[in-house]
Image (tube, grey):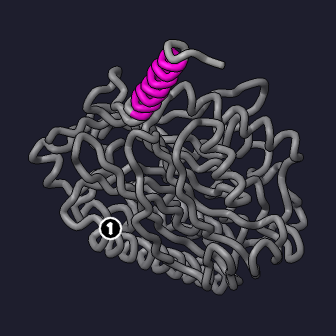
């Protein structure tokens, strides 16, 4: 039997051990929520369309451009570059299949994640068609930012929910997350507007040129122009609904909008965002620089899968002839916006830098068919 002194010593050891465990847990919790010293009052933001690799053709199963092995290599190239860039906040588009993609990426990076399916076909639970389509958007944040889900708004298309979807056409959405940084609430939004022909002068001039050369009829020319007007009208609906959602959720608080808008800076859609007091960070920092997030001159995924010479010639007609032409045009269609503009004028938000990233070729692989946008901002109380 233990004497009293030994009992007292054991009790003392247990008390010390419990104290040490509690101290360690408290330290780990503080470390996890501590603002990284290297950026102090700054936040780094990344937006990237990770490319689903789907053809968006098929009923039972969507066609896929690449093998599972190549897709896995792209994923590894993506994670490698994100780790090198070390963003605090990430907006992701064309993540497929959800929720598995979101969970895996968050685990690979050690981030919190929030997602919503944007394209799901006809689905109840995990059963549906096309069986390989559960695509959507993700917001990831470092854990110290204490993120909270803030909402979601459907912009176009039929019903798309987490558990069920009944969607027969292109759909789009905007999702929102609230973070707290230096005691300041900041709202994060990410969106992916639908892809279709724009009314860019280059495209309109190409249509007129084809008509003048007798390559298309007047009826075909008029029909293509009509399709373009319809596409722009739809993106304007997405624009206005996105603005309404931001105003509802963020009110006058600082916010960040990350998105693949499928619209160029000179478009009516982007001009409408700017007119509503959003700041295009890339244009603000580089007003005289033409840099592109869709660049067929250097992106090997675009060259291999999207240009006319590498497509099925039986699929080519007067309509997708214009589509192939647009794919050859370098564009900046991926954005990070800050707002409201009053927060920048007052100095609450200070834009420090921005650049186009995620261009690296790793073992012959590029992570996506898009390049990303990386921005550093400073938050002042």
Q: Name which quarter of the figure residue 360 lies in.
A: top right
Residue that appears at 30% across and 40% down: 287
Q: Residue at x 65, y 50 (%)?
A: 103
For disc 1, the marked residue is 246
| Quadrant assignment, res 222 | bottom right
Q: Is residue 1 left or right of residue 371?
A: right
Using a 10 Å C-alpha cutoff, classify the residue at mark 1 as few (fewer than 14 neighbours), some (14 to 19) or many (20 or more): many
- In the depicted view, which residue is nearer to us: 27 or 56? 27
Q: Quadrant of the C terminus?
A: top left
Q: Is residue 300 left or right of residue 39?
A: right
The residue closer to the viewer here, 170 or 322, is 170
Q: Which residues are magenta?
A: 7-29
Q: Nearer the viewer, residue 296 or 252?
A: 252
Q: Is 53 placed left or right of 160 in the picture?
A: right
Q: Is residue 155 magenta?
A: no
Residue 146 locus on image (x, y percent): 39, 48
Determine whether the residue tagged by mark 1 lies in a helix, strand or loop: helix
Position of the N terminus by quadrant: top right
């Amino acid at each position: 039997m233990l004497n009293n002194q030994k009992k007292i010593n054991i009790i003392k050891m247990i008390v010390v051990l419990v104290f040490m465990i509690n101290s360690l847990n408290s330290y780990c919790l503080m470390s996890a929520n501590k603002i990284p010293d290297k950026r102090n009052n700054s936040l780094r933001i990344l937006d990237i369309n990770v490319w689903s690799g789907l053809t968006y053709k098929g009923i039972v199963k969507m066609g896929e451009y690449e093998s599972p092995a190549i897709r896995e290599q792209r994923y590894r190239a993506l994670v490698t570059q994100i780790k090198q860039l070390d963003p605090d906040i990430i907006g992701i588009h064309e993540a497929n299949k959800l929720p598995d993609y979101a969970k895996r990426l968050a685990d690979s990076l050690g981030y919190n994640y929030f997602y919503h399916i944007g394209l799901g076909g006809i689905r109840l639970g995990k059963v549906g068609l096309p069986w390989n389509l559960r695509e959507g958007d993700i917001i990831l944040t470092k854990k110290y930012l204490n993120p909270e889900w803030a909402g979601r708004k459907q912009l176009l298309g039929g019903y798309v929910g987490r558990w069920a979807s009944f969607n027969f056409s292109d759909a789009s959405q905007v999702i929102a997350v609230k973070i707290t940084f230096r005691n300041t609430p900041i709202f994060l939004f990410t969106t992916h507007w639908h892809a279709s022909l724009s009314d860019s002068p280059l495209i309109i001039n190409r249509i007129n040129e084809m008509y003048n050369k007798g390559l298309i009829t007047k009826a075909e020319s008029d029909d293509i122009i009509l399709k373009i007007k319809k596409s722009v009208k739809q993106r304007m609906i997405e624009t206005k609904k996105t603005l309404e959602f931001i105003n509802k959720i963020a009110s006058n608080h600082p916010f960040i909008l990350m998105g693949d808008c499928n619209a160029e800076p000179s478009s009516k859609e982007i001009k409408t965002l700017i007119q509503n007091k959003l700041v295009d960070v890339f244009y603000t920092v580089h007003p005289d620089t033409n840099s592109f997030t869709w660049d067929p001159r250097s992106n090997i995924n675009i060259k291999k899968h999207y240009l006319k010479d590498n497509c099925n010639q039986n699929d080519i007609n007067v309509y997708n002839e214009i589509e192939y032409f647009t794919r050859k045009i370098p564009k900046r269609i991926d954005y990070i916006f800050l707002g409201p503009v009053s927060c920048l004028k007052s100095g609450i938000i200070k834009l420090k830098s921005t650049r186009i990233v995620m261009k690296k070729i790793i073992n012959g692989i590029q992570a996506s068919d898009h390049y990303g946008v990386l921005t550093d901002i400073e938050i002042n109380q």
